[in-house]
Image (cartoon, grey):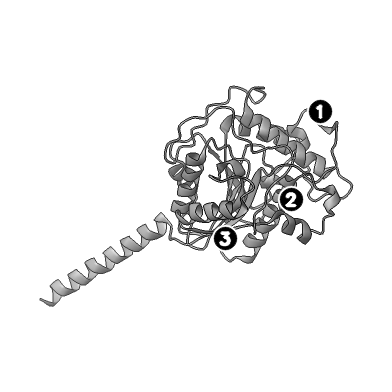
């Protein structure tokens, strides 16, 4: 069974409040302040950033995030638990898969990150030259985070460009296009930390990715296990649910086993956190053509038909 179930404190837990989602509209309420204590989404983002900070300072770090410290309170180094949290395993897996795919694929210059606003990948990863990075996340969190990152000296790699796409946007697809994204060019999509309120909102995300990603593009990341319409312990049922969900949007998905990731990274099980499963790590391949591809071909077919009609008229 190839399912990664994260353990320990839930950082992808069900939100305290839910709201009705609309197609392609991630209906997140506006953030009045980045430090809003009762914001469950923001608190989860802070916890994820804290886990990256702790792992960066562990004796044998799985990953190093040189910028995350500027996003956290000064007392974040207290109570440094040295257990290897599954979130860090997932982050390392996603980092490696993301860069490996971009570096080995000709023409892949578009990366779309669906994040919580505190993701530092645009700054800390070694992006190939000319990569366009689109960060879809909550606006208020992003604005305050990017200011702190810039103050700390963080910079996008030379020759690359990063664009923020507000997750509150009503039409994510057109906003992405307006910022330079093209559905006729290869892309890779990452989902980690992005606030989802229910299964319907994640289906909206799947719809957006399916509409914009070319055939053969990858969509990878981790989703909260509470999205699954199965019992947590029922792994076969969870895998079937995952397969059916992704296939309904044109994706062939593979769930990645937590133990497999740890083994491949040669990490001692003694450092792993224990507890109840909270997340699923996945890699999905898109099997459909993007809307832009279909429109390009439709226009080309129409042009060929019109030219054929004109030639036939001239012969008469």
**Pointer 2 or 3: first along the chain:** 2
Q: Which mark is residue 89?
A: 2
The residue depicted at 60 percent of the width and 57 percent of the height is 283
Residue at 52% from the left image edge and 56% from the top image edge: 243
Q: Name, please, the residue furthest toward the left.
A: 316
Callout 1 crowding tier (Cα within 10 Å): few <14, some 14–19, many ≥20:
few
Q: Position of residue 163 (x, y in %)?
A: 57, 43
For mark 2, does the 10 Å Cα neighbourhood hold few (<14), some (14 to 19), or many (20 or more) residues? many
Say which mark, if any, is on residue 74.
1
Which sits earlier in the primary sequence, circle 1 or circle 2? Answer: 1
Q: Quadrant of residue 223?
A: top right
Q: Return the residue found at the far bottom.
A: 315
Q: CA distance from mark 1 to mark 3?
A: 39 Å
Q: Which residue is mark 3?
A: 108
Q: Nearer the viewer, residue 126 or 203?
A: 203
First in residue order: circle 1 vs circle 3? 1
Count of marks overlaid on the render? 3
Q: Tell me the number on the disc at residue 59.
A: none
Q: Identify which residue is drawn at 49% across, 30% down.
A: 19
For the residues labelled 2 and 3, the Cα–Cα distance comes to 25 Å
**Quarter of the image that includes the N terminus:** bottom right
Left or right of 7 on screen, residue 159: left
Between residues 20 and 154, which one lies in front from this camera angle? 20
- Asked if the residue under mark 3 is in contact with the one under mark 2, i.e. CB atoms within 8 Å, the reply is no
Disc 3 is placed on an element classified as: loop
User: SS for tag 1?
Assistant: helix
In the rendered image, is residue 144 in sight? no
**Closer to the camera: disc 2 or disc 3?**
2
């Amino acid at each position: 069974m190839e399912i990664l179930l994260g353990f320990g404190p839930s950082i992808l837990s069900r939100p305290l409040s839910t709201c009705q989602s609309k197609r392609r509209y991630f209906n997140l309420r506006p953030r009045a302040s980045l430090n809003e204590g009762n914001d469950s989404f923001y608190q989860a983002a802070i916890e994820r950033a804290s886990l990256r900070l702790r792992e960066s300072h562990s004796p044998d770090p799985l990953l190093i995030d040189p910028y995350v410290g500027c996003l956290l309170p000064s007392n974040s180094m207290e109570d440094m638990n040295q257990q290897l949290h599954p979130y860090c395993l997932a982050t390392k897996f996603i980092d490696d898969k993301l860069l490996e795919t971009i570096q080995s694929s000709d023409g892949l210059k578009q990366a779309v990150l669906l994040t919580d606003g505190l993701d530092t990948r645009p700054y800390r990863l070694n992006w190939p030259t000319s990569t366009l990075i689109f960060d879809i996340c909550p606006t208020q969190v992003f604005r305050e985070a990017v200011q702190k990152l810039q103050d700390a000296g963080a910079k996008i790699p030379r020759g690359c460009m990063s664009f923020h796409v507000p997750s509150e946007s009503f039409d994510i697809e057109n906003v992405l296009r307006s910022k330079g994204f093209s559905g006729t060019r290869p892309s890779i999509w990452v989902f980690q930390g992005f606030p989802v309120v229910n299964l319907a909102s994640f289906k909206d995300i799947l719809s957006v990715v399916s509409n914009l990603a070319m055939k053969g593009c990858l969509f990878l990341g981790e989703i909260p296990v509470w999205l699954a319409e199965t019992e947590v312990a029922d792994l076969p049922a969870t895998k079937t649910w995952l397969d059916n969900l992704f296939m309904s949007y044109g994706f062939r998905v593979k769930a990645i086993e937590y133990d497999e990731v740890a083994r491949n990274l040669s990490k001692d099980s003694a450092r792993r956190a224990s507890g109840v499963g909270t997340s699923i790590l996945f890699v999905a391949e898109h099997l459909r053509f993007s809307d832009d591809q279909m429109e390009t071909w439709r226009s080309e077919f129409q042009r060929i038909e019109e030219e054929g009609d004109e030639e036939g008229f001239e012969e008469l």
